[in-house]
Image: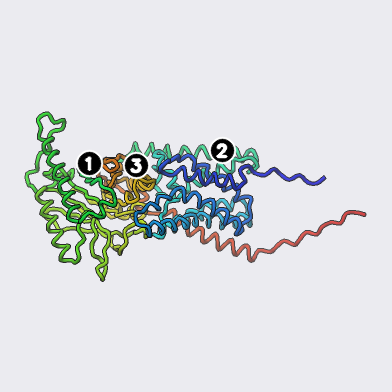
Amino acid sequence: MGRRRPPALPLNSLGWSLAGALALALSLPPLGVYPLAWVGLVPLLVRWSARRPSWAYARELYAVLLAASCCVGFWVLFNPDPGTAALGGATLFLVPVPLTAAFVASGAVRHRHGLGAGLVALALYVIAAEFLLLQTSVTLPWLLLGHTQVAGLEFIQIADLGGVSLLSLWVLALNGAAFLALPRAGRAGERGVAVAAFATLVAVPVVYGAVRTAQSDVPKGYTRVGVVQPGLSPRAWAEAPAEDRVELLARASDAFLARWRADAAAPDSAAPPDPAPPDPDAVRPDGLRASGYGLLVWPRASLPRPGSAAEAAALFETLDRWAGRRDLSLLAGARLPAGDDGEAASAAVLVRPGAPAATYLQMRRVSFADAAGVTGDRRALLDTGGARVAAAVGFESVFGDHVRRFTRDGADLVVVLARHDLWGRSAGLDQHLLFTRLRAVESRRSVVLSTVSGGSAVIQPGGAVTEVAGWMEPDVASVDVPLFRGQTFYVRHGDWLGRWALGLALALSVAAVAVGRYAPRPAPKRRKLAPA
């Protein structure tokens, strides 16, 4: 009788691979069923362990991951500009490339050196590929494995150690343990160890988060922030004359400040009015000026676009008089001339009474998602007198290493002048908000997110999100924001895990090629002839 073949691993089919990829998509916002990502890669790992690395396998895996990419990023097609929408749709075809390349390259290592070496190589290649993706702006870095966990507040607290890369490694480790626990993936004892490892991996971030929360720093103070949301559709906001946008925001701000002063002065007010400092220009340690507000935030593209440096100076002087009469600092989104040929850049402008206007030009731009224009090359903290603000424009808040550099430079508050409402009330709204949540956890800083149409929110240093204005709701929200000065491990060291993974992945690739080229090949076995 012929020798019996061992039974095949379960989940080894194209259908199961597609199901696993869709589980990854469902773990991302807006649904955010994040535990699905803990096992979503298992069918892909089973398929990976059973297939030889080949172009046929690469095409199959790419098609499976492309389905997940389209489920996650279909909202980019809703851009009001048809050309930009088409470009955004085309970039969806690039999203699966890093993960596909990591699986195929590690499959070659597994084929030559065994399952254990292949799994280690897969982890290194995935983290290295995500690290390289975050260094570019070719496409939205949406399909990162760490992003699948943004809805799980208890599990993302470890981001202050290694950012989204550490979360990606954690998700990979969970899937690896689940894969090794499958029947036929190992002996019974090894499967028991894999199950214990899976349970331990689930528990570790929860325990760390509890300990980290119990040891949280005491804020050095608070600053009161007013977030002005016009509540207009993206089209109406874009088509409105610049002067009308400024007048709308100024009227809303004045009406809100008048109501606040009236409420604070009312005898039956629940909170007594803040005593005014002796000097009208003085700022109390909590960042509040005589107006009661440390900072007023206007959304992106709030200000008229000046055509020259002289026009910009005149605009800033007008805003300085307006803010001075109200005794507050104003942070507003703008388009400012930056290039030699007068090309504009998206910017944040801070006007503080008694001080020169400060500007920050957007440094990281996603080509099909952010406004066209040049980018800046200088990090600039915006000092309100009570807080040092790091401004992020558009989709900059998706890049963790970029934002954490401002915190390392001394920022104690992050303000995001977001652009995601341009696509309407789509999945991108929730995705960008929750991806930005990671910036708060990584740096343990409060984050204020300002929008035009809806979704303005405040994110606490622990990651808790409070939406301060609903969709298409004109409002001015008042929030007291805690200010912190400490530095987390991630703030001090940045994407250390990605850098190490990239270096080790390159070293592993070179070693694998060298061993494969120079190792002696075993002699072919001779078949024994059966006796006559």
Secondary-structure class at tag 3 = loop
Viewer-side label of 3, 1: 1
Would you call the spot at circle 3 few (<14 residues within 10 Å), some (14-19), or many (20 or more)?
many
Relative image position of residue 454 (x, y in whole percent)? 29, 44
What amino acid does circle 1 point to? Ala
Measured in 3D between alpha carbons, the distance from the residue under mark 3 to the one under mark 2, in whole angstroms, is: 30 Å
Which residue is at the front of the view, 442 or 86? 86
Q: Give the CA distance from mark 3 to mark 1.
A: 19 Å
Eye-nearest disc, 3 or 2:
3
> Which amino acid type is marked by label 3?
Gly
Which of marks 1 and 2 precedes in the sequence?
A: 2
Closer to the chain start, of discs 3 and 2, is 2
On the image, which quarter does residue 478 sit in? top left
Residue pictured at 34% horizontal, 54% vertical: 80
Question: Could you say whether the residue bearing mark 1 is in a helix, strand or loop?
Answer: strand
Give the image location of residue 188, x and y in percent: 64, 38
| Mark 3 vs 1, N-terminal side | 3
Q: Residue furthest top?
A: 268
Query: The N terminus appears in which quarter of the rendering?
Result: top right
> How many numbered marks appear?
3
Q: Tell me the number on the disc at residue 463.
A: 3
Q: Name the element at disc 2.
A: helix
Left or right, 531 with respect to 426, comes to right
Viewer-proximal residue, 445 or 12?
A: 12
Disc 2 marks which residue? 195
Q: Nearer the viewer, mark 2 or mark 1?
A: 1
Kindly identify which residue carries mark 1: 477
115 or 318, which is in the foreground?
Answer: 318
Q: Is residue 474 left or right of residue 531?
A: left
- Tell me residue 251's x, y (percent): 15, 47
| Label 2 crowd (10 A; few <14 / some 14-19 / many >=20) | some
